[in-house]
Image (tube, helix red, strand yellow):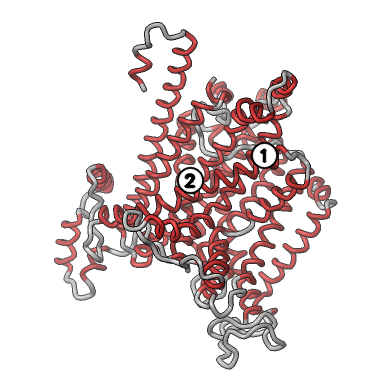
Amino acid sequence: MSAVVAVPRPGAAVAETRWLSGWARKVLRMLVTTATVFLITSFGTYALGALSKTNPAAAVLGETATPADITRMNHQFGLDRPLVVQYATWLGHAFTGDLGTSYFTSIPVAASIRQALPVDLGITGLAALFAVLIGGTAGIAAALNGGGRLDRSVTAVCSVLSTIPGFVMGIVLIVVFSATLRILPAGGYVSFGTDPVQWFRCLLMPSFALSLTLAAHVARQLRTSLVATLRENYVVGATVRGLSRRRVLLRHALRNALGPALGILTVGVPALLSGSVPTERIFNLPGVALLTLQSSERHDIPVIQGTLLVTVTTVLVCNLVLGALLARFTPQARR
Amino acid sequence: MRTLRRALRLRSARLSAVVLAVVAVAAVFGHWLAPLDPLAQDSAHVLSGPSAGHLLGTDGIGRDVLSRLVAGTSSSIVATLEAVGTALLVGIVLGIGSLWLGRGYEWASLRFVDSLQTLPYVVFVVAVVGVLGNGLTQAMLAIGLLYSPIFFRVSRAASLALLRAQYVEAAELFGASRLWILRTHLWSKILPTIAVTAAQASAECLLAVQSLSFLGIGVQPPAPTWGGMLADDLSFLAQQPWAPFIPALTIMITVGALNAIADAISDSADLPVVDSSPTQPGSVQEVPDAAVAVR
């Protein structure tokens, strides 16, 4: 990005160069904010472990451990050094792909996470896709129908959806499609590489259930901003000039109404990851969220810290990409 | 107060107020109102449908569903109030402080709030509980902390506009202290905004609390909770597929009532919409720093 800014293409229009550098500058500022936020959250994640009252060495060694054993174990885990030093070491190792080992299973944390991560990427990715497709279609349909029966029913469905905890939808789907109709598996996971069809069958219900709350938000937001945009003079002007309804919607209105809806997705990523904990519990999916839950029950601190770090990093990367897209494609943010 | 009275003129608001009153009564007197002991197991009537003895039937180990529903109200409400209270306190103190305590503090508090908003709340609470031990207080403080950014941004944005008003400037020129300005000029004007946000946050926190109690975090089984009842029903879906709908409907009605109250207050107070999503540099929602730089 910065290379483009430093050496403008010869012959490129002046306005374009300025716009490019403006966008690059914005992305650069986002990167700085993201890096700061990453440092704060990762330190918080590490410090959380230090707040723990249970001594990991004592927990691992059991009740028969002598104080000398515990001191040796503490030294082995590096728990006798100052917190900031421990944090720096931990983060440094994390960047090389080493997140320590579980206190209980002695399996490297990074290995467990690497095994579990595709599950989460699968369900949250599909859920985001469903949310955009369902929410987008419903929002556009409602806005075009402004005030009509379709508009009112979309609004009503959205209000109802926002009162249901996401996981309840999962239970409803299991009741209908697994317990009654017996056409979809009620749980379990098959990797994409093994059997793509079975993979999709396993992830269909969880990701659909997960997506609905977000889809309602997207629909509501898109409807509001699209209704406002459709009233703008340039849209009326384009219609008067005789452009087709489809062209006015796609090229003029939608592009300008998309910003707020994309903004909702920024908030939606943490919401999806949050919802994936009960969802993975219900559908018995071996993802990072379930790993966090299981290690939380065992007070397995290195695993908890590792999963939290990975989760936060996922959110930050998604927000950065969405923010960059937002700055690139929405005219309000481009200025 | 006037706003509240105007809001209650709406039919949806009155209905919601009645629902919330019923929930409040169940929360306070639930343990006396429950027809049967919510923990007692009636082994003769396991997984029975609604009957005269058990109005809403029994669950998988013969406990009375209605009694568990009524007795579980208080823990849901107490948990939600704890979380929203924490969020209110942390958010408003940090938010109003960010306008007065200088640019360094402002920058730090904005980044801190951004950091909180990157944390998925269930994952975070699960992690906190894993480290500090499972308990209602830990879980609710953690949730409250994660919901504080909403109050931070709302109180900050609402006060930012007010602080630029001429009468505030005049009061400052007359030598009024910041606390005096906060009490006299700011507080009454940002209160409706905060009330709406609090109602919305309560709805969201109530949902979050149900997700957590479903996972056995916060209030732990066998103590009755709505989310916990859903978790228990999950094992008996084949025999009693309709059972989860009872706690789910209770949650939906309560959350719906809170949302309706929030809408009614915000409609009748005619409040500006405040964006509470994380800071996106360059996007329109960023609050300009200029106003603060001047002071």
Q: Chain of mark 2?
A: A
The C terminus of chain B: image quadrant:
top right
The answer to which quarter of the image holds residue B72 is bottom right
Q: Amino acid at mark 2?
A: Val
Q: How many marks?
A: 2
Q: Residues within 10 Å of mark 2 (few under 14, many from 20)?
A: many
Q: Which residue is mark 1?
A: A223
Q: Which residue is mark 2?
A: A269
**Residue B28 image point, x, y percent:** 67, 71
State whether discs 1 and 2 lie on one chain. yes
Q: Amino acid at mark 1?
A: Arg
Please say if B76 is above or below A9: below
Q: Secondary structure at mark 2?
A: helix
Point 51% across, 50% down: residue: A271
Q: In front here: B48 or B118?
A: B48
Q: Chain of mark 1?
A: A
Point 70% across, 67% down: residue: B23
Please say if A59 is above or below B58: above
**Residue B137 image point, x, y percent:** 49, 62
Please say if B204 is above or below A105: above
Query: Is residue B132 visible from the viewing direction of this image?
Result: no
Q: Secondary structure at mark 1?
A: helix
Query: Is residue A69 visible from the viewing direction of this image?
Result: yes
**Residue B185 image point, x, y percent:** 71, 35
Which mark's residue is nearer the viewer, 1 or 2?
Answer: 1
Point 74% across, 63% down: residue: B19
